[in-house]
Image (spheres, rainbow, N blue to C red):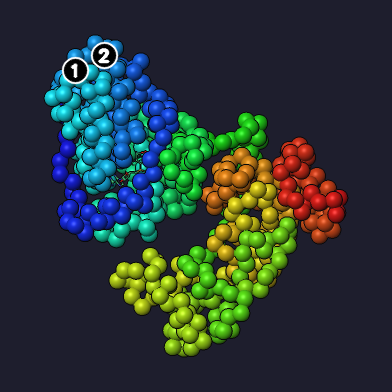
Amino acid sequence: MATEIVASRSVPGRTSAALREIAELHARCGIFTQNSTARKMLGRIGWDEQEDLSRARFLDPCVGEGAFIVPAVETLIASLRRTATPLSRETLAGRILGMEIHRPVFRKAREAVGAALVRMGVDEPLASWTRDDWVRNDDFLLRDFQGATFTHVVANPPYLRWGKLPQGLSGTYRACLPGAWTSSDLSVAFIAKMIDLTADGGRLAILSSDRWMHAAHAERFREGSLRKVRIDHVEKVDPREVFDTPVSTYPVIAVLTRADAGDAAPLPAMQVADKSLRAIVEGWMSRFPSIVKAGCEIRVGPALGREAAFVARALDVEEALLSPYLRAREIVGDRLAWEGNRVISVHAPSGGLIDLRRYPRAARHLGRFRQRLEERACVTGDKCAGQWYRTIDRVDPTLWARNKILLPEIFRVPRIALDQGGYVPAHSIYAIFSASWPLPVLRDLLACGVLGVVMDCIAPRIGGGCKRCYKRFLSRLPLPRWDALPEETRQGLVASSAARNRDGFTERIVGVYEVEIDLLWQHATRDWCSSWDR
Ligand SMILES: C[S@@+](CC[C@H](N)C(=O)[O-])C[C@H]1O[C@@H](n2cnc3c(N)ncnc32)[C@H](O)[C@@H]1O
């Protein structure tokens, strides 16, 4: 049965401009997989010569030079021989499909597949016919598969932010693909389509950065696509061992099974160190509402897009536009060590951009950065005409003037400080606001070990022993409602927090969370554990 492939909805016409864009795309994302990793991943999804693969169908949506498809071909032929399946066009057609958008690389993969078939003893004419059936120069994202499905799917999908995609391709994808696939990263669109093309019970192995599992901008994809799969295994891998070129991402190999998970949105079982820790955190989660449901609001600092244009210590800009600005390194223990930077707010309270003619000093200052600001992806396109000086997110001084708790997104040991100075935090900092919890008490509760325990259990580890507490993890932190605590507990927490009596405070939290005191101390912030006040 041949794979039914009809013409892509709009493979960008193969004009020279389109080919240039494809070459550009390939140059930005062509990171190839090492052979040992490719073989290991094939084994993980059961593409194994000891299996009966005579009815199986294999898909690699972006073959590159053939890292996965070549060993997949060898495995299939070995398996067919083992089950004494005769090799013919009828038995081979459609068993494997590999796609590659970039023609020069596609040619290499097709040659490599042909050579592998001959090496495996397939006669030349059949090998030549089969490689043409199995390897296609095509755009996976635009291909209409007309209901075809695959039992085994494997990929190291292109990893590229939408802002870095060549404009024509990006426009075509945004016009043709669901919005939830195109709001994050190209790999997310690939993973979503791979999931859709996997047959019920079929298996997928994905080598990619873990951002599709955790990043806030992939939330809609997760809501739509991760319900269709079970996540069997997630393993952090060393980029130097799995790719053939150095990269700065933190990849994982994820193995999934296509199975409807219904409403129980799966949380990837990420590096959860220790089962007893997980049991403790799950116990807290079943007893307490999340921090958000307990009345707290979590926000990330605004993204500016070229921070250097908007932030500095000495800015010759109208005072009305300036607010104090804080970077992650200025959160030192439980204190803020402001270095004196301020940020320009270019949005009016109504939400629109300010008219620079009314702010000549700001106009002069921003004008010096005009060329670099105009190059940003966030201000290209017709809708953004005249908006060259906008920040990606609005810097809203009224919002940030409120008291709040600040903590950096990436940490080895959490740093958590109270902000009573109305700072605008950088994009790498989370802010927690609460009208119900007294903020000094909430800061101490997080610092005394509760945040450390929860993040140790659910937040992904990145390089250098650091953790990354994305908003979706922070938002799940279990916290009792302040007014649900007994009066005596509330008074005790307020008094011990005000007196900086950290032993007393921690003991009260032990009572609330019903946890061993040692576990909290092990996960407390450095300032909490310092001998200064113990
Ligand atoms: C990260 S590389 C991986 C290649 C190969 N699977 C490997 O692991 O060595 C991604 C490949 O996807 C190709 N690619 C990018 N967009 C594509 C698309 N829409 N359809 C098919 N291939 C695409 C790129 O040209 C590149 O060769």
Q: Residue at x 36, y 21 (%)?
A: 48
Q: Amino acid at mark 1?
A: Leu
Residue 58: horizontal and vertical position, in percent?
29, 29
Image spot of residue 65 (x, y percent): 31, 38
Question: Disc 2 marks which amino acid?
Answer: Arg
Left or right, residue 5 beside residue 158: left
Classify 26 as above or below 323.
Answer: above
- Would you name the residue on which mark 2 appears? 81
Residue ID at (29%, 12%): 82
- Which residue position holds label 1? 87
Q: Does the residue at mark 2 contact the one at mark 1 (Cβ under 8 Å)? A: yes
Q: Is residue 256 visible?
A: no
Q: Is residue 413 above or below residue 117?
A: below
Q: Is residue 339 visible?
A: yes
Asked if residue 401 lies left or right of residue 386, the reply is right
Residue 153: assigned label: none
For marks 2 and 1, the one nearer the N-term is: 2
Picture quarter containing residue 198?
top left
What residue do we see at 81% from left, 51% from top? Answer: 530
Q: Is residue 245 above or below residue 532?
A: above
Circle 2: element type: helix
Q: Residues within 10 Å of mark 1 (few under 14, many from 20)?
A: some
Residue at point 18%, 32% (across, down): 133
The residue lying toward the viewer, choosing from 222 and 296, is: 222
